[in-house]
Image (spheres, grey):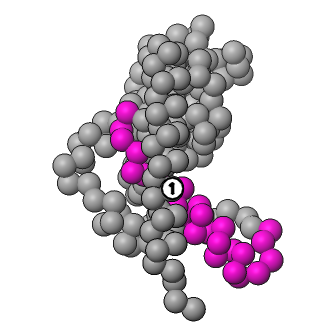
Amino acid sequence: MNFVEARLAKLARNGDRNAFAELVELYKDKIFHLAYRMLNNKQEAEDAVQETFLRVYTNLHRYDENQKFSTWIFRIGTNLCIDKLRRRRNTYSLDAEMSDGEGADFYAMLPSDEDTPEEQLIVSETQAQIHRAIASLPEKYKSIVVLRYLHDMSLQEISDVLDMPVTTIKTRVHRGREYLRKKLEQEEEVVSTNPVPK
């Protein structure tokens, strides 16, 4: 339980704008990272961050101080992303999202200690493969995989965020991981059967 966050939430609920600004500062990057991984689109992720904080602000009176603030805000952000995915499910095209280069730009911001351009290319290709595999996950596994492996949450924390039994989370983590493994193996097969000309 983070008492600082609970105190900031209480102050914000009583109209302290600086306290709310501190909460935004603490969580904006984490929520962006979550939204970007789930939505695979920078603009939509930025919109999701704004919508998340708007919902947090308008629902501060509902926040239960006995619960971790991080669990509460991640639940709001995750549910918002799931709603966005459901709305665009019929028209969503992974190729259309990736064609403008948006998917790869995120990795360009990560620091690299690789020496040669060849090594950098291999690393960025691997990251892009993982990124595509996560983007293609079925909706019910995507949020769980993102929270587990990219936000390093425990099964219990994910259970709290998504309001699901731990046994369901455990099953979906396993199935999501299997889905990713198969997807990455398929990509490897495609690469090995269609080598890039030198």
Left or right of residue 191, residue 65 in this image: right
**Residue 52 image position (x, y, % from top left):** 44, 36
Which element is circle 1 on?
helix
Q: Which of the 4 image quadrants contains residue 148? A: top right
Return the residue nearer the eye: 110 or 10.
110
**Residue 74 image position (x, y, % from top left):** 51, 30
Q: Residue furthest bottom?
A: 198
Return the residue nearer the eye: 170 or 187.
187
- Residue 27 in the magenta stretch? The answer is no
Q: Residue at x 30, y 66 (%)?
A: 96
Identify the residue under disc 1. Answer: 184
On-image quarter of the N terminus: top right
**Residue 67 image position (x, y, % from top left):** 58, 12
Q: Residue at x 52, y 10 (%)?
A: 64
Is residue 178 visible from the viewing direction of this image?
A: yes
- Residue 130 in the magenta stretch? The answer is yes
Tell me where the magenta segment starts and ends, as one range.
113-140
Q: Residue at x 47, y 13 (%)?
A: 165
**Magenta-drawn stretch, dominant element (helix, strand or loop):** helix
Name which residue type carries label 1.
Answer: Leu
Q: Residue at x 36, y 38 (%)?
A: 139
